Amino acid sequence: MKKGFRILIVDDDAAMASTLQDILEVEGYAARVAHDGRTAISLFRKKAFDLAVVDIRLPDISGLELVCKLTDVSVETVYIIITGHGSLESAAEAVNQRSIIAYETKPLDMDRFLSLVQQVVQRRKAEEALHQAEETLRASLEHAPDAIYMTDLKGVFLYGNAKAEELIGYKKEELIGGSFLKLNLLPAGYLAKAGKLLALSVLGKPTGPDDIELVRKDGSRVWVEANTAHITQRGEKVVIGFVRDITGRKKVEEELEASHRQLEHMLQGMIHVIERITETRDAYTAGHQRRAAELSTAIARQMGLPEETCVSLIGMAARVHDIGKTAVPAEILAKPGKLSDFEFALIKIHPQVGYDILKSADMPYPVAEVVLQHHERLDGSGYPQGLSGDDILPEAQILAVADVVEAMSSHRPYRSALGIEAALEEVSNGSGTRYYPDVVEACLAVFRQNGFTFSSSF
């Protein structure tokens, strides 16, 4: 992986750039040097790099401006910003750019620098593994019994499987690059309703099941049932649609029911892929969300909450409660030492970021709200809003306890696992102050009476 991993060093300090290049090449990386932004852009246009190490002050452009320009050339590249004049303002600006993974001051700590580079290499390996998984999934979709298609957010077809070709009569090469409107797949009298469904789909709203009449290439018509959802593929959001011929609906009711179960299974698989994408940024907390979901649902059931209206939603919120950490630099999430006040302030934004992401995805209430409140505490000492008492949702109260117990019982970069008993002692000591007594009581019962244990892996 090192041999094919391309790194560009952009620094007008020739000695510094040459030293970094020598060190990286000794480590087995392919490194190039540019002393100004113009040369860097020229090199990128010839062949993109996996990582760019960019000085924040260049003779012709600022390093942060250069990152923006290079991102237009290659969306896959990540960046390390280096500076001899560090400031909180420039650091905060760098953190706000998701492609920047670190902000380092000169003179560089070479051990830390090489560790950051290795983290990028490992992340790229994980992305390649995910890409292979996507290709495997696509191969399985190709021969699925239902028509399956993908479009970009403008409604342009990116993919259609063999059943899609059969259903509408267009070959793949005719389908790709077209759209429902371009290919005249919708009857004139149906454009208004279909247009509304398509608009909801491209705006990120899941649709379906909806009965739609399609016009095939030969002019014949077929009624189909369509469902759409959003997935992330290679870093880009796309719409995936599942379409089944229901012209003989009354004769195939049993088959349609089986199709719905299959669709749900496939959508859950997509959710799992999205979870893996989130977790590749922080190896130490891989599986944390799933284990927190296990304990949250066990506590909710112990408390006798309704399965469909509470337990399932608590589990859903727990599975994605740390999605906001995608906005936190990876080196902070994996930092082995104590966090600075500034770094901890960045960590504390993740509930709000998670809420914003899930709210825009139109998740069922109160999933987004539970994610926002999972670090709030009974006595008002939590964050981000400092809520207290009954202002905190019951579902968030449950997730707060499950989150603490799972985190304390698992290994972290800054400490070894403290164990279940230490975790249970923590929530017991905080019962009535930081944590709700009923939730703590149920949590203790889950472990000590029901024999609950976390799954070892996912």
Image (cartoon, rainbow, N blue to C red):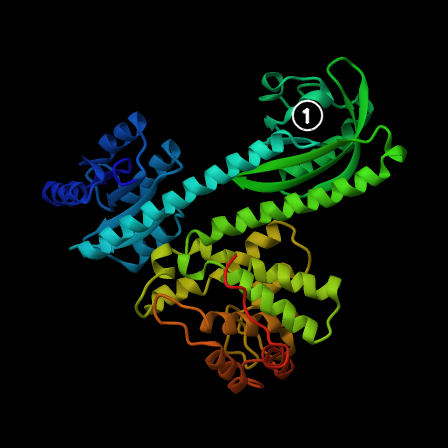
For the N terminus, the quadrant is top left
Residue 281: give x, y in percent of width and height.
42, 53
Within 10 Å of the Cα at label 1, are there few (<14), some (14-19), or many (20+) other Cα atoms? many
Residue 238 versus residue 170 in the image, above or below:
below
Q: Residue tagged by mark 1?
A: 164
Asked where in the image residue 282 lies, by quadrant, the reply is bottom left
Residue 327 makes an appearance in the image: yes
Residue 175 versus residue 124 in the image, above or below:
above
Residue 360: give x, y in percent of width and height.
60, 50
Q: Amino acid at mark 1?
A: Ala
Residue depicted at 56% across the width and 85% down the height: 431
**Residue found farthest to the left:** 15
Left/right placement of residue 67 relative to residue 232 reads left
Residue 62: give x, y in percent of width and height.
27, 42
Asked where in the image residue 301 lies, by quadrant, the reply is bottom right
Q: Helix, strand, or loop for circle 1?
A: helix
Left/right placement of residue 119 relative to residue 274 reads left
Residue 139 versus residue 457 in the image, above or below:
above
